[in-house]
Image: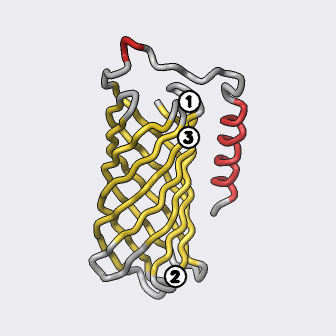
Amino acid sequence: MRPSTIAIILALLSVASRARADEPEPTPDESTSSSRRFAGRLGALAAYRGVDDLSLLGEGVSLSLGSETDRLAFMVNLHFIDARTLGGLTVLEAGGSLTLEGRLGPRWRVGGGVGVTYLDVQRVTSNQSLQSMGPTLLARVAYDFGERPNLYVLADVEVQWQASGTIPWGPTLQVGLRF
């Protein structure tokens, strides 16, 4: 992971730990408890992927847009990851997913989803790349640092099944703004 990405993630975590620390837990408003509303997230992410005998480490961005109530959220998610193997191979991962998330109390969310992920592995010896696409399953847990707009931290674990026959898997950590 690049030092600039680590610095951004640490700065966001530092701000988040101080943000609204003394704010009381929110209580749902009776008049809006079942209404749907727009929700979104924009975050920086760090990811690990295991692919056969390779380990990939990368950083990227994620955008999620959707609809939520006080109990559930349905999100459309996009992410882009620029990763490297320990041997120096460059790998681009781009994915889209649909997730359903439920609230556990006022701050925690858990959920899961399905999607499609594209992998592009750049060859070291030539200007060619190996490309593959396949379905993805994921599980996630998130913590919101207060009502929107505010910071969030999200962790997910995903398993992909690429058309090439490989099965990339691994965790992703996101830190960003929930709006």
Q: Which residue is mark 1?
A: 150
Q: CA distance from mark 1 to mark 3?
A: 11 Å
Which circle's residue, 1 or 3, is located before the other in the chain? Answer: 3
> Does 73 appear above or below 113?
above
In the rendering, at what x and y percent does residue 35 appear? 31, 21
Which circle's residue, 2 or 3, is located before the other in the chain? Answer: 2
Instruction: Provide the secondary structure element on which disc 1 rests.
Output: strand
Instruction: Provide the secondary structure element on which disc 3 rests.
Output: strand
Give the amino acid type for the residue marked by disc 2 in the picture: Leu
In the rendering, at what x and y percent does residue 25 appear? 60, 24
Residue occupying image coordinates x 57% and y 28%: 146
Residue occupying image coordinates x 49% and y 67%: 170
> Does 177 appear above or below 91?
above
Q: CA distance from mark 2 to mark 1?
A: 36 Å
Along the horizontal axis of the image, is 126 left or right of 173? Answer: left
Which circle's residue, 2 or 1, is located before the other in the chain? Answer: 2
Q: CA distance from mark 2 to mark 3?
A: 31 Å
The quadrant holding residue 36 is top left
Q: Which residue is mark 3?
A: 143
Farthest residue in the top direction? 31
Along the horizontal axis of the image, is 46 left or right of 66? Answer: right
In the rendering, at what x and y percent does residue 83 appear? 52, 67
> Does 31 appear above or below 68?
above
